[in-house]
Image (cartoon, rainbow, N blue to C red):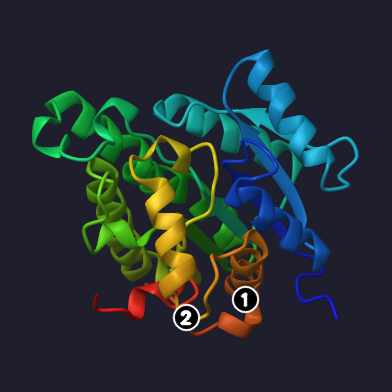
Amino acid sequence: MKLLEGRHALIVGIANERSYAWHIAAALIEHGCRCAFTHLPGEKNERRTRRAVEALGVADPWLAPMDASSDEQIDAAFARYAESFDRLHVLVHSIAFADREWLARGKFVQTPRQAYLSAIDISAYTLLAMARAAAPLMERSGGGSVMAMSYYGAEKVVPGYNVMGVAKAALECTARYLAAELGERGIRVNTISGGYLRTLASSAVGGVDDIERLNLERAPLRRNVEGADVGRTAVYLAGDLSSGVTGENIYVDCGVNTLGI
């Protein structure tokens, strides 16, 4: 049974076939959702995203460049989307950034001001900016679901996650405030706290090998999370099964967040 027939989604953050955004898109498409995609500006970035999207079986995908650090480019990407589609039901925010120089054990206290602010800008403020741009389209579509990717390092110290943890905490809080304001317009906003998955972004974090090993040893399910686990949760959040769910942070980490030590 397809749960998302007739729904339209905009996916922000597909870098390659290992990214969470890719797995989310795969699950949405499997359930009948029509997906459009953004990519970082530049031919190389477009080719990389196009290659990953075509691996999903999407022929001639809709792609638009967007540098999320620019409000003008965010507005332009959503304007292009509105020219091509008359509906938007789902927005997937799966982007984050922190200078990898400061993602190492013992380096957090040395984080310079600009690196700190840049991480929050790209990883958290962009959710607000994109939700603002998406809201009119979603409202005209009868409501919508916005979801963003977080990680447990937003709540507890994960060695080496450092300023990215601060940024993810800001992301989760931003989602709650957006949920409170956009709910009366029929728009739900949630975050998914995905477990460790080896991606381009996670490879920049110091101590990732230890995280992977410890999860395998200690997670209640005795395994690391898979992209498909998060993809299926995204299907739930995108559709009517989660119609009463907003402002939540949903853990998909094989139970790691339940452990005390």
Please name the residue shown 74% across and 46% down the image. Answer: 85
Judge the density around disc 1: few (<14), some (14-19), many (≥20) Cα neighbours within 10 Å: some
Q: Position of residue 119 (x, y in %)?
A: 29, 36
What is the quadrant of the N terminus in the image? Answer: bottom right
User: Could you tell me if the residues under marks 1 and 2 are in contact, i.e. CB atoms within 8 Å?
Assistant: no
Please name the residue shown 82% across and 69% down the image. Answer: 5
Name the residue that disc number 1 marks.
236
Residue 164 to residue 240: above or below:
above
Residue at the extreme top of the image, as rendered: 43
Query: Which of the 4 image quadrants contains residue 27?
Result: bottom right
Q: Nearer the viewer, residue 164 or 77?
A: 164
As drawn, is 32 to the left or to the right of 81? right
- Which of the two discs, 1 and 2, sits closer to the camera? 1
Q: Nearer the viewer, residue 217 or 32?
A: 217
Q: Identify the secondary structure beneath mark 1.
A: helix
Label for residue 245? Answer: 2
Please name the residue shown 61% across and 59% down the image. Answer: 90
Mark 1 → mark 2, Cα distance in angstroms: 10 Å
- Say which amino acid is labelled 1: Tyr
* First reached walking from the N terminus: tag 1 or tag 2: 1
Residue 75 to residue 230: above or below:
above
